[in-house]
Image (cartoon, helix red, strand yellow):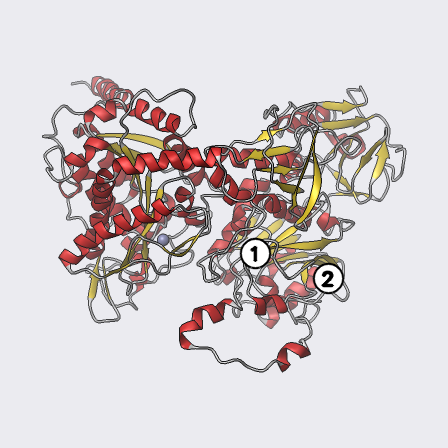
Amino acid sequence: MSRLLRLILFSVLLTALAVAPARAQSASDLQSPADFLGYEMGSQFTPHHRVMDYVQHVAAASPNVEAEPYGESYEGRTLMVAYISTPDLLDERETVRQNNLRRIGLADGAPTADDAPAIVYLSYNVHGNESVSTESALQTLYELADPTNSQTQPWLDNTLVLLDPLVNPDGRARYVNFYRESVGAQPNARRMAREHQEPWPGGRANHYYFDLNRDWAWASQQETQHRLELYNRWMPHVHVDYHEQGIDSPHYFAPAADPFHEDIAAWQREIQTEMGRNHARYFDENGWRYFTRERFDLFYPGYGDTWPTFNGAIGMTYEQGGSGRAGLMVHTAEGDTLSLHDRFVRHHATGLSTVETAAREADRLVSEFVSYHETAASNPPGDYAAYLVKARDAADHGVPNTPDDRIHALHEHLEGQGIASTIAGDGTDMQRSGLRYADQTEQSAAIEPGDLVVSLNQPKGRLAKVLMEPQTTVVDSVTYDMTGWSLPYAYGLEAYALEQSVSVSGDTEAAPPTLQGADTDTPYAYLANWHSIADASFLSDLIEAGVKVRFAREAFELNGRTFEPGTLAILRANNRNMGSDFDRIVQETATEHERSLYRTATGFMDEEPDLGSGNIRYIDAPHVGVLAGSPLSSLNVGEVWHFFEQQLGYPATLLEPGNFRDEWLSDLDVLVMPSGSYGDWLTDERTEALQGWIQNGGHLIALGAANSALSGRDGFDLAAPPADADSAAASPELTRYEDRAREAATRGTPGSVHATTLDGSHPLAFGIERYFTLKRSARAFAYLDSGWTVAALEDTAPLTGFMGHEAQQELDDTLVFGVQSYGQGRITYLVDNPLTRGFWHNGQLLMSNAVFFVGNE
Ligand SMILES: [Zn+2]
């Protein structure tokens, strides 16, 4: 055969595979993972591309399986789901899916069939270095796919399984590559061996070092966004998130520990218990250790067990002892050797057992699932019927933009979660009373055009409540993660929880951006708003396009409109070098970012400053460096990296702290110290180098725990608050041993939301009307002596979430955000990390202010 002909045949074959992944008529070609991959499962780690190959093979060889890519990771690896059921149910897959959504009111029309299969969604390896999960997934896939398997086949008669073998391919690739290049000819079980010591950043998180098992409710990461799209398309009845924990821990599976969120139904606990009892049978038979109902609670909504639970599913986490320190084999503290194979068989057993239980409970699962959503829609839980989020009053302020950016962003956030919300249309005029979020008092609130209304009378009402309610009810103070998060606080918006239901109509599409103001093709200047991260991202692109931009340090007035501090002024006078390209580039960039612009033919303002004034400051585009490496927390580094690349869209140079050289500072205008423990990185010499650089105009931005590294050092106006004499005098109390966890909680700061007092006249606060801060630490500093305290804690008691009373005492009159002038430079202290987990929307604008305005003011 000629080479050309072979090539043509090959591409025809590829095309055929791509368009028609037809199911095999017989399973004679179906190979086990061991046969296909060429090694016993549990004897090696299977890399991503071989995992994909195997899933494709099973889809081609088994009548029980279809495979579907559902997205890509940041590093371009395929995300894949396998659908497993009987050939008949697979043929009806789309109908099954639509009927499931129809039954719970998430799709129009009545279901076209009475009986409904249980839909079980198995997610493996969300933490990349908990690497046995994917290996177990392949074996579970095979045994469910094999038509000759008499154990599994009956289950498929009333069950459809979605199996995602590798949720976090980038993190797992990092781990698997590390392990392969570190292990010797024989694996070494000693814990001290290099193969058990993952280097920074480790394989747990994704490309941007985000923990994908904290991201379900915020969907800041691409992998989560794709997965939620798939999840919401299906709305499964069971979801399992596969994990690993410490080497010495026994296996953990459902039922989960307290605290259960109050929005978890009794039947969900009961079926979790059914699942756990079924798994226990297999573990008992094999003599494997396991535990249930301890440690892993169901409260924080960003997990792969809680989020599905708030969507009416049986959401569960299974944890095998092992993880990135276990390799192919490792010694346990009790003198055993834990092998990859040991880990493999346990996660495999629970996979099959989950499907078995779901098949047995299918009728109950479906009927409870349906009534869960019906009740949510007809009789919303809790004290409130709806949430009202107020749009910015733009009648005579800034450049009119509909809808308000942050309202639009919150609306899209909810949409990504599958929650319906409405932006009130023209003519809306209602009055309701409700609880005001900012101070939690009863107030009367007007519902006006542009406001966002989230009614709880909807199938996803419970999830809406969990993400929006002004106060979470903490059943128990001993929990695994943050306890306060409500989205109106994160977006810094004025909001009300309404007791009466409310129905508004409106248009949720954003109006196209417009050119407003003077009718001229060559205006003296363009003005743009500064209210949101979308405005900051627009500025980034203008700078990248070579446009010179200024910002208003003071408000000015023009044509009866007030332009607030922070307003961007793009003057022709600054951009003469661009010639006739100037208007085109500014307008095209605005269109791309959906920004409206206001044109003025004159620099003479009705109320000064004029646009030529020194109060309209030039934004000298900063060269930004970010410390990114050991000894910092990779999660905190990733938040900053992701912020610059994905949210702001502005270049930042990542700098390896271990190789840091003082000379690098001369190439930087801004250096960001991500939150984390700096250990002995900040030597006296480095402190001196930083001081010299700041005095010469450098700008140091310290986030979260980085502030502790600077506190008390020469030149840095940051110090612990004076000790409180009263609290030291209190007599010690004796604590019972059994109360130790509860006692520790009095000092606990798992994550709560607090009101701040904000100095809106400082450039760090421009564009921000109110700032609610997410506190995850009792780290406390006094107000700055010589600098500006831009945000201070208004009240140590949280608006939502739990903070131990001892921790609260330490936070009285303390700094949240401050800026110090030092020589010609600046130090910005962001004591509460505004970029936590990429979801504190208002924090993104605050960070943009720090980058562009502080130091240029
Ligand atoms: Zn995990």
Are discs 2 and 1 less than 8 Å apart at CB? no
Q: Is residue 142 visible?
A: yes
- Structural distance between the alpha carbons of marks 2 and 1: 36 Å
**Up-down: is 381 above or below 791?**
above
Graded by Cα atoms within 10 Å as few (under 14), some (14 to 19) or many (20 or more), the crowding at tag 1 reads: many
Tag 2's secondary structure? helix
Residue labelled with disc 1: 752
x, y percentage for residue 360? 21, 40
- The answer to whether the residue bearing label 1 lies less than 8 angstroms from the nearest atom of ligand 1 is no
Q: Quadrant of the N terminus?
A: top left
**Up-down: is 418 above or below 213?**
above
Tag 1's secondary structure? strand
**Up-down: is 613 above or below 752?**
above
Report the disc number at residue 568.
none
Q: Amino acid at mark 2?
A: Gln
Q: Is residue 75 left or right of residue 252?
A: right
Q: Is residue 662 left or right of residue 16?
A: right
Closest to the camera, between mark 2 and mark 1, is 1
Residue labelled with disc 2: 695
**Up-down: is 688 above or below 770?**
below
Q: Is residue 226 visible?
A: no
Q: Name the residue: 59% across, 28% down.
A: 503
Q: Is residue 25 left or right of residue 70?
A: left
Q: Looking at this view, is 244 or 281 the one in front? A: 281
x, y percentage for residue 589? 64, 29
Q: Amino acid at mark 1?
A: Ser
